[in-house]
Amino acid sequence: MNECILVVDDDREIVGAIAIVLEREGYTVRRAYDGLGAVEQALDPAVRLILIDVMMPKLDGLSALMRIREKRNLPVIVLSAKSEDTDKILGLSMGADDYVTKPYNPQELAARVRSQLRRYTLLGDVHAEKREGEIVNGRLSYDPERRELKADGELVKLTATELKIVDLLMRNPGRVFPAEEIYQRVWQSDSYACENTVMVHIRRIREKIELNPKEPDYIKVVWGIGYKMEQHN
Amino acid sequence: MDTKWNNTTETVEIEPVMPQRKGTGLRAAAAFLTFFMGVSLTLGSLCGAVGRRAIGSDYAEWWQNDWQETPVFRNRISNDLESFLAIGVGRTVDWYHPDYSVEDTVSGTGTIWFFADTPMASYETSSAEAQDTSPDSAYKHDLNTIYAIHAADGKKYSNLEEVTGYRIALDEYSKLPKGYNFLLIYEDGKVSIWKDGKKLPVYDSDNILDEDSLWNVPGYTNFKVGEEEAKVTIKMAVRQIPILYKGSNSYSYNSLYWIYRSLQNSHEAWRSLAISFCVGLVLLAAWFVLRKERYAADQAIAKVTFHIWTELRFLAVFLCLLCLTVPMLAAADGYLWWYPDDVSYTIMQTLRCFGTGLFNPGAALGLFWAVWFIRNDHHYHPAETRKSLYRTVSSAMRKKELTYPIQKRINRRIAIRNLATVLATLGSFALLYIYLETYDEIALLGICAVWLVLGLLSSILWGRRERALARDFGLLADHVAAVQSGELTTPLDLPADADLRETAERLNSIQSGLKAAVAEQTRSERMKVELISNVSHDLKTPLTSILSYSELLMQEPLEGAASDYAQIIQQKALRLKSMVQDVFEISKAASDQLPVKPEVLDFGKLLRQTLADMDGEIQKSGLTFKLDLPEQPVEITADGTRLYRVFQNLLQNALNYSLPGSRVYLSLKTTGKAAVASLRNTSRNELPEGVDFTARFVRGDESRTDGGTGLGLSVAKSFTEACGGTFRVETMADLFTAIVSFPVSMHKPKQ
């Protein structure tokens, strides 16, 4: 594999720690400690992915990201101590592909890097092979005819019940389903206090498709209302 | 080259303008003076001419140069001829001239002469001559007319002897003495007249006999003489240029001289009017050239006239009008009437009356300039800045009044009003009494007038003030309401003399103080949040390294206790991470900076979801959960994610601190308009009394070794309140109860 990843942070120890994790995963790591250095190094076509901090001297991460975007199309993951929704939305709208808050979980970070790289490598193939009626939502793609769910292009193994739930949610991204409705549609019978049953299955699905099942990106709980499939680009 | 030259010519052209600018004041003054004099002279001479014509002060038209051609001369001569005829037949001369024998009050030599510059003849009248009783005594000494009367009875009367030692025959024109050019001979009841050597066609000319000619000589139809008169012969000659003879007791004396003088005067008057008019036109032409320079002068004049009270201005206009109209009215008295038969005559009379007023151009000019100055002043000063006596006095009184507190001001006004009413009532009673005594209707009119004045005063003077006060009260009340609702930018601006001005200003200062305080508070809140945000960021960065490296450390092969130590570092770093996040969120919630997305949700479902979410931990805990949740939806408005955190923390709390194997009770009840969720559990440790469990870093366990952050309840409380609910903790012995309540939403849930 040996894909080259550029890690940018003004804190050298953080860069070092990330480098160790990524190198263990088999990537080559390049380092930069400010925004200008990041822009300079990002121009090297060998760099396949960038992990970049926001608050940095000389040039902040988001500005550097915008400059890099002018020149190159490659996955960029923003790594920031700013954890508020507004910061996340700002980062994603500036062209970041993912937003990870500090302190990060090393395994999750590695998983996100892997996911982004796979998506970018497979992107052409995925679109070329896109079948009739296939539903694509971010990392996920679902073929209702074959009843197959793929995450980052890899087939996810699901039980029959889980597949029914996934089928319902993938066909209606963004729509909020109350637990009762999910239960009724999946198990074909009315039930009260089905919350636990539905939740158990959803948790299992999450563990199969989410990068961090504790902070899911796709199947989300809308508290007090129901569950939904978050829509991604 | 060309451009260079152009440039120099341009600068040369500009330069001469500069010295002209210096003379602007002078030029303005000149322009104004030409305007002033031009208008005054043209308008004045026009008015004078119209007035002169209207009054009819001239004996002759201005074009008549020869005084002997004027009707008044003819009238005089014919009257004298009649008098001489009377003398000739021996009648007393009193039937036509009432002023013939009026005695001068100052007889003899003491006559007062008003025309000091008039050339005087050298004939002194002696007292003996003055007492002459002959019938022609009144004519004797005025040698402007020399006469010889051959009376019917053969007597002769003549003043020819008066010409010292000089006897002249008045038989022929050629024999007249030097200086005389008019000869009238009456013989055999017929009149012959020579003038300047030519015989005038007395009887064969229509001209000389027409109505306006005023010839009234015997010999034609309207003047038949009797037989006696026909016997008389009268010869009279008149001087070409009359002179003033001094001393006489009769007004008829020197009358020819006065006729001559009057004609001269009127000629002079017309001449000066014509000259003034022409000079005025020339000046107006000069002004027209300079007209643009005048505005500076107008402005300067307006600056001066600005200080004149409006009342004085209108008094000046009124006086000028009075001077104009009084002569008009006097002329109109008895003349001005509607004559239905002769409209043109009526119009002429009316015009004549108006013209009379113009005879004195001073009043007309005064009126014109007064109006012009007022207009000029009004052009430069808006109505509200103009000075008037009323305004000066009332503003001075108002200033004095404003030094009193408002209640005293209003009380004073009420008192003055009451006093006026009482006085009016008393006055009315007095007038009523007078009416009952005298039955004079004027007393009744007086009552009406008193109440009318009172009504006008209260509606105009006091009413205006009261309406203004009512308006200001309204504005003040509105402003108080606006300030209460948070409007802090626009101050209340009342007029400077408003009763509530001071109060309004105080309110404004309260408002601005409040604004400053709010701004300060906002600023410090923002700074606080920024500080927390920065601190949390600064804490998270090293924490990231700690967590990363402790994780890496744990993956290394460690000997003995080192593995445990690495694990402890990892655990505590994770705890620190959640504490940093919690503190950050609590602080934001405390500063009202926590973003919340309120939506209608089912409280019961939220609790079930939370339980389901934490099902794994609940199962592991060995605690029994007793639920009392309603099956029908309980709708509240809150931010679901935040509220989930509230119950996650509460349940976590219960899992962490409950007595092992005990029961945890979770219930949701709808009481009236509130949805109340309560979580009860039995504490493992003894709960200390008098402790606020929702305060930060407070735990039931003082030793702080249980792994909790001590922020769970604090976060729960902050988030509940940020969502619009209330959070309460109750403890009874070992029983711990957390109560979260929200108002039940009235809205229907979305599909």
Image (spheres, rainbow, N blue to C red):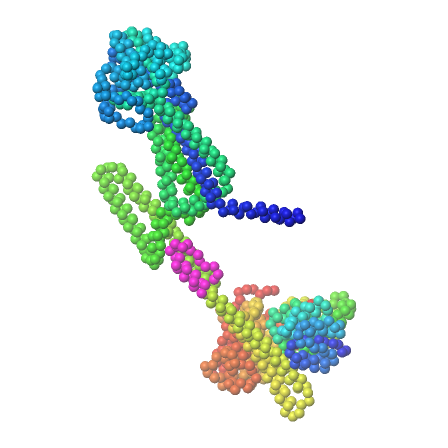
> Where B456 sits versus B482, above or below?
above
Left or right side of B262 for B140: left
Question: In x, y percent, where is residue B533?
Answer: 57, 74
- Nearest the camera: B126 or B477? B126
Left or right side of B88 for B288: right
Question: In x, y percent, where is residue A1?
Answer: 77, 78
> Where A8 sits versus B141, above or below?
below
What residue is rendered at 38% in x and 42% in y?
B313
Tell whether position B497 is magenta: yes
Question: In x, y percent, where is residue B593?
Answer: 54, 70
Left or right side of B84 for B198: right
Instruction: Please state the extent of the stretch shown in magenta in the rendering.
Output: B488-513
- Nearest the camera: B256 or B180? B180
What residue is rendered at 26% in x and 10% in y?
B156
- Nearest the camera: B462 or B620? B462
Tell whether position B496 is magenta: yes
What residue is rendered at 71% in x and 75% in y?
A6
